[in-house]
Image (cartoon, grey):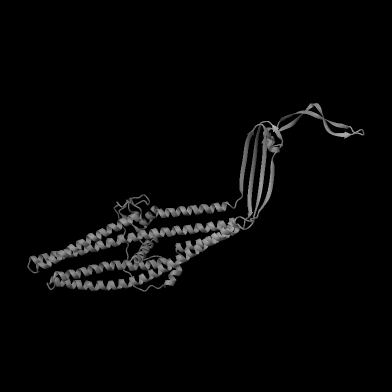
Amino acid sequence: MRVAYKQIWVGMTLCLVTGMSVVYAQNTPGALAPGNGTVASTRLSLQQCIEIAQQNNVQIRQGQLTVDNTNLQLRQSRLNLLPTANFQSSQSLSGGRNIDPRSNQFVQQSINSGNYQFNATATLFNGFTLKNTVKQNDLALQASQQELRATQNTVSLTVAQNYLNTLTGTEQLLIAQRQADVTRAQLERMQKLVSAGSAPEANLLELQATLAGNELDIVNAQNTLDLARVALLQAMNVPINQAFEVEPINVPDPGLTPYTETVQQIFDVAASNLPEVKGADLRVRSAALGVEVAKGYLYPTVALSGNLSTLYSSAARRFSPNGSTTQQQTLYFVTGPDGLQTPIYQNVPGGDMDIFPYFDQIANNFNRSVSLILRVPIFQGYQSRNRITTARISQQSAELTALNTRLQLRQQIETAYTNMRAGANRYRATQTQVVSLERAFQVAESRLNAGAINATDYSIAKTNLDRARASLVQAKYDYVFRTKILDYYQNKPIAF
């Protein structure tokens, strides 16, 4: 029975999602705004219930966050292909014996210095690790999106289950009420016959007992309907103190022509369309690229680096000549025949040592360089090898998950197909039973009116007919939606 209901739930979802049913509540004033936690409209369609549940469901919201996070990882992996650039500056103040950063000589004074560097590095080759990481994250994003769709389908199935239970409860309540109405009409007629002395009082008592049983059936059907409504509201994550009705779906009497597609044909189409299977396959491809990413760490890395730098020191001085005076500067010494050294002088302009301006130092100390970097991994504690092994294990796990997903899908299709055939047989047999019991009830009612049978025999005939009609309604929904679930697996449009 649980499997049968599941087929019905999926079919119900597809009917509304594909737009095959009529949504009246969308035009109802004060209709529910999805996600606000209250039901303001008096009638809701299945599509509206699904929209509310999907906006309120926590798992769907978590799945959307997973998609957003995976998308961010993809963007970052693409940005990692671009060069990196950094600017660094330092400003220091020191006293006592220091090294002048400009002249690299010791000085005995307080120095205020600044150092400024700009560096840019571009990776030219690293075993295609960066490119494979981009491809891997792209597949992971697609897998997350498919998994989100699968979660949305699961939520839709849950809502459809409870929606169908509500519809079934409503139908069963109407059937129970009609049964009671028929019994009341017969009871009134029997009351007149007993009063006229044309029928025994025992017949009247039997009909009163039958009416009491019908009223109990109404109470039970109402309780079942109330529980179904509570379950539907809980599936939508809405408080249960809401007054609403579900929109009925017009399902005509089904035909009983054999289903043309085989189990293998249905499976072949479903394996190419369901998001669960697509997501599992994308995870396998992503894991395979993870192995290639891990292998990339075994290759050398080639990078190009550029550097710009300059510095400033408050200890720096520069000579400022003064044209009005001259000074003698010793150039070198000449050794004479007597062994004495004679200095050779040069007259140079006189001047003073002035402070070296800040921006002049920045311009004069400017330095630029370009480097080609080769980094060869020799031994890293087997980190790269272990990374490859871990990636291969992840790949094998993803492959097993994809295989299990297909196995479960095949089993679900086989079960759905078997249930569809069983539902067809049940509907055919129940339909024949109802026709026979209707004729039997008509005969029993005529004989009761003629006094040929007692009320007990009449009640038995009526009860049998009522139960058969209720079973026919359930068999009708059961068979129709079992065929729709098979259509769903084949990505067929749903129509009635």
**Does residue 309 lie above or below 379 as drawn?**
above
Q: What residue is drawn where x is 38% and y is 63%?
A: 10
Quarter of the picture holding the N terminus: bottom left
Residue 324 screen position, x and y as percent? 79, 25
In the image as oriented, which residue stretches furthest toward the right? 337
- Nearer-the-camera pick, 136 or 52: 136
Is residue 356 rendered to the left or right of residue 283?
A: right
Residue 219 screen position, x and y as percent? 22, 59
Can the viewer see residue 484 in this picture? yes
- Nearer-the-camera pick, 86 or 475: 86
Q: What residue is drawn where x is 63% and y is 58%?
A: 299
Residue 413 screen position, x and y as percent? 40, 68
**Does residue 101 lie above or below 277 as drawn?**
above
Residue 142 screen position, x and y as percent? 50, 58
Can the viewer see residue 252 in this picture? no
In the image as oriented, which residue stretches furthest toward the left? 197
Quarter of the picture holding the C terminus: bottom left
Q: What residue is drawn where x is 24% and y is 64%?
A: 175
- Nearer-the-camera pick, 389 or 144: 389
Q: Quadrant of residue 4?
A: bottom left
- Nearer-the-camera pick, 247 or 416: 416
How many numbered markers are drawn? Answer: 0
**Does residue 212 lie above or below 238 as drawn?**
below
